[in-house]
Amino acid sequence: MNTTEPIELALDLGETTPTMSLSATQYTLLQHEHALQRMMPKAAEQGAGIVVGAPFNSGALLGGEHFDYAEIPALSAQKIKALRAVAACHGVSLKAAALQSSTAHPAITAVIPGSSRPERVTEDLQVLKEEIPAAFWAELRQKQLNSSLAPLPQH
């Protein structure tokens, strides 16, 4: 799903609820506030897994030209610029931060980065293990670039 609402509705079903849902672009470093309001808490409460798809928001976080399969909105472009600045200040790979933040919530069971080449799979696995300083996450929160409700990656 490219929005959280269908997953939320499915989780609200009384007799039959999903055990796993794919949520594309909705729980990312760039965009996660809406998912944290209902979808993620419901999934965690019910033990329903969330698979994060497109954790780089269609490549926008990594310098691509698209955000959620369309042109990058000005507000998102500003936030990406701010995220890049904080990452550069701390010597953090934005790819590592994006993948690690998209896997930090207890409801997340998997992430589909959408690698365009086979060698990217190895790279993705490596950045998941990259050590990111706590000061990076603290600065993101201080600058309101990361929700205080979002669980932080643990190493």
Image (spheres, rainbow, N blue to C red):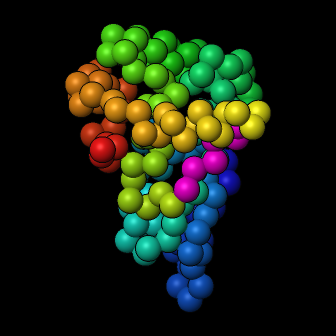
Task: Return the residue found at the far bottom.
Answer: 15
Tell me where residue 133 sits by quadrant.
top left
Residue 97 spot, x, y in % from top left: 43, 31
Q: Which image quarter is the N terminus in? A: bottom right
Residue for point 51% across, 66% down: 49
Q: In the rendered view, would you say 71 is above or below 102? A: above
Say if residue 28 shows up in the picture. Answer: no
Q: In the rendered view, would you say 104 is above or below 119? A: below
Please count the marks in the image.
Answer: 0
Residue for point 43% across, 75% down: 46
Q: Which residues are magenta?
A: 110-116
* Lateral position of residue 52 relative to residue 65, left or right: left
Tell me if residue 6 is in the magenta stretch: no
Tell me where residue 26 sits by quadrant.
top right
Residue in front for this viewpoint, 153 or 75: 153
Residue 113 spot, x, y in % from top left: 63, 41
Residue for point 39% across, 21% down: 92
Residue in front for this viewpoint, 31 or 118: 118
Residue for point 51% across, 61% down: 109
Residue in front for this viewpoint, 31 or 9: 31
Tell me if residue 115 is in the magenta stretch: yes
* Lateral position of residue 46 relative to residue 95, left or right: left
Say if residue 19 shows up in the picture. Answer: yes
Residue 21 spot, x, y in % from top left: 61, 64
Residue 29 spot, x, y in % from top left: 46, 34
Q: Which image quarter is the C terminus in? A: top left
